Amino acid sequence: MESHEQQFLILNEPMIVGAMISIVVGALSILLGLTYFKKWGYLWREWITTVDHKKIGVMYILVALVMLFRGGVDALLMRGQTAMPENGLLDAQHYNEIFTTHGVIMILFMAMPFIIGLINVVTPLQIGARDVAFPRLNSVSFWLFAAGAGLFNISFIIGGSPDAGWSAYFPLASLEFSPTVGNNYYSLSLQIAGLGTLMTGINFVVTILKMRAPGMTLMKMPMFTWSVLITNVIIVFAFPVLTVALALMTMDRQFGTKFFAMQDGGMDMLWANLFWVWGHPEVYIVILPAFGIFSEIISTFARKNLYGYKSMVVSMVAISLLSFVVWAHHFYTMGHGVMVNSIFSITTMAIAVPTGVKIFNWLLTLHKGKISFTTPMLYSLAFIPIFTIGGVTGVMLAMASADYQYHNTMFLVAHFHYVLIPGTVFAVIAGFHFWFPKVFGFRLNEKLGKLAFWFITISFNVAFFPLFILGLNGMTRRMYTYSESTGYGPLNMLSFIGAVGLGIGFIILVYNLYWSIRYSPRDETGDPWDARSLEWATHSPVPVYNFARVPKIKELDAFWFAKKNNQPLSDGPYEPIHMPSNSGMPFLMSGAFFAAGFCAVFSWWIPAIVFTIAIFVFMALRSFEQDHGYYISVEEIERTERELGGDKE
Amino acid sequence: MMKQLFPKQHVMGFVFSLVLSVVALSVLAFDMSYKMGMAILLVTAIAQASVQLLLFMHIGESEDKKTLYTNIIYALFVGVVTILGTLLTMIWGYQ
């Protein structure tokens, strides 16, 4: 191992020192607050050790909101830096670090956990299950994700952030050109979080295939559950590629191998290839559940069943297969021949077909519907036209010969923000508003929600539409500054104004959360939106066992027809309910993962090995553990149901 | 009774897997062309995987065999696409 000079704590950047101080102060005040209000036991019993899918989902979403803040601050700094020509807010190195962390955090530590959080909260309820198939594994998933996110986020104060872009292309990301520990953080934190995601994938595929309520055949599942099934299948097949690629990256950077080197038989482009073999399916991992969320919301608030259910399912299956055969469109300009580029052009454009089918299905669901313009519905309606702009510019980029003009310009940046923000961010915010009353028993304020919606939607377009024009004018991405003579100044300033507006929108959203927790009227019905699928058939907040009696399903939207026909979904006496017991082991094991990862970042191999052994000790302990869960007695079910306002089904 | 003492399927599977392993090993023992060797390895590998799945793991006997087969086909699709696609973009189609 060659050693290189670098700082342990980053102390030469006033902004980072400021962030460091605020993190320390914030952490101390949280610790003091927990001690003062004697909440340690509550935190440990109710949250850290929980295996309840609803609570795990809430924790995912909480982390995602914090990460949205972090990634958003990165974005504001970038837009602030480029708002004026020759601006000096950030230097080149700091700018490189910020666009790298913005990308990684927004995709892997914001979009993914937000989606997985909603999947956790909603899916078992939608299929009438009591929990996921492997509740303990679910907790491991969450805590591994949290460990990965934590490891990635401390990089900017300890050792320095990765600075080779979120795609970390070789040779730039190699030890030779990125000698700091930044990219070690990248490979190890993504590895740890990726393990958690892979477990989530397996968990939900099994949950959906094995734990549906009696009578719910695959074609009677709600559309969101379908999208979750397809998404998790993609996760199971795509994430191993990332695991291998990151392992090779770690080997190259820390053990002197030459997989991605430019000499000695290595191939630097192989990284880009492997990264996108995972990376393109990953795009669909964050977009398909969003399609599911929009399908639920649109059919609920148009008061109609979803148009073209079968074609929706078929198009999602088609997207899941096509998502694996398009990855080379991310590097058309890397030097492969016309034949390769043509193949990947055609497969890429082919994805527009199933996506188009879905867009038309949503439009026809709206057709002649009794539309109510609630906050989640507004996001869903705004999604359709904005996402279509993103999709059409995507087809423009898909043409390999034209891509030589667009490649790595702001046009591309505008395109993927136009797909990912309406596609994923609008979806998770809409889903957040939609399912919030299910989890907490009261709705978010509609007035504030709509205000935030208008701020976010308008500012989004102000922030990103100018980037299309800037890209066509020749501005490349990832430039930290430009001269006045380029003429890029005014449009970049406009984009900065939009970014500030997005920030304000986010603040309103968080204020809405605070306001609603304090003042929002409680919902007694469990079904505040008059919705269609099974999650609304139980109480809000949902009792730990989800359904006092497992519902019996005869048709799609069974809950809707049960309401219309006044027929209960289930009957008969209560029976004792078997539930999984809590465990602190996932949390402790992920702590060992975090410690091992942190030591490995700095190549402190002895402690890294010690912590890795600890991980295996936890796994061995689990193998010998006798844990058969516990039963909730009939009396307790009766008491809980009475407290929540009587039998629901 | 005899069936319990002598599980025919398992024994057959065991013999098959041993034979297939020996055939695969023969690639090393005998002097043959690279292509010939790879062909033998490919065929024995596929046969070996099928023996394991069908005879030992009883994939055809469970009630959700449709799901299992779909899963395997999907995995094969992704694996083949990834490997051949990488060869295509990085070697065959590279200018």
Image (spheres, coloured by chain):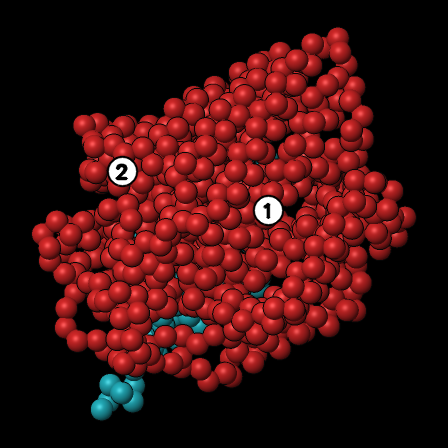
The quadrant in which the N terminus of chain B is found is bottom left
Q: Chain of mark 2?
A: A
Is A179 or A90 nearer to us in this picture?
A90
Give the chain ID for the red colour: A
The x, y position of residue A304, in whole percent, is 20, 38
Please tell me whether residue A564 is drawn above or below residue A630 in the rendered image.
above
For disc 2, the marked residue is: A301
- Residue type indicated by callout 2: Phe
Residue in the picture at 58% in, 69% down: A39
Query: What quarter of the picture does the C terminus of chain B occupy?
Result: top right
Which chain is displayed in cyan in the rendered image?
B
User: SS of the residue at dot 2?
Assistant: helix
From what the image shows, is residue A333 above or below residue A33? above
Q: Secondary structure at mark 1?
A: helix
Residue drawn where x is 57% and y is 43% of the image: A68
Question: Toward which corner of the image does residue A146 lie, by quadrant?
Answer: bottom right
Three-letter amino acid code at disc 1? Met
Q: On the image, numbered disc 1 is attached to which residue?
A: A67
Residue nearest the observer in this picture, B48 or A54: A54
Please name whichever residue, A333 or A392, is drawn nearer the observer in this view of the structure.
Answer: A392
Q: Quadrant of residue A370?
A: top left
Front position in the image: A485 or A496: A496
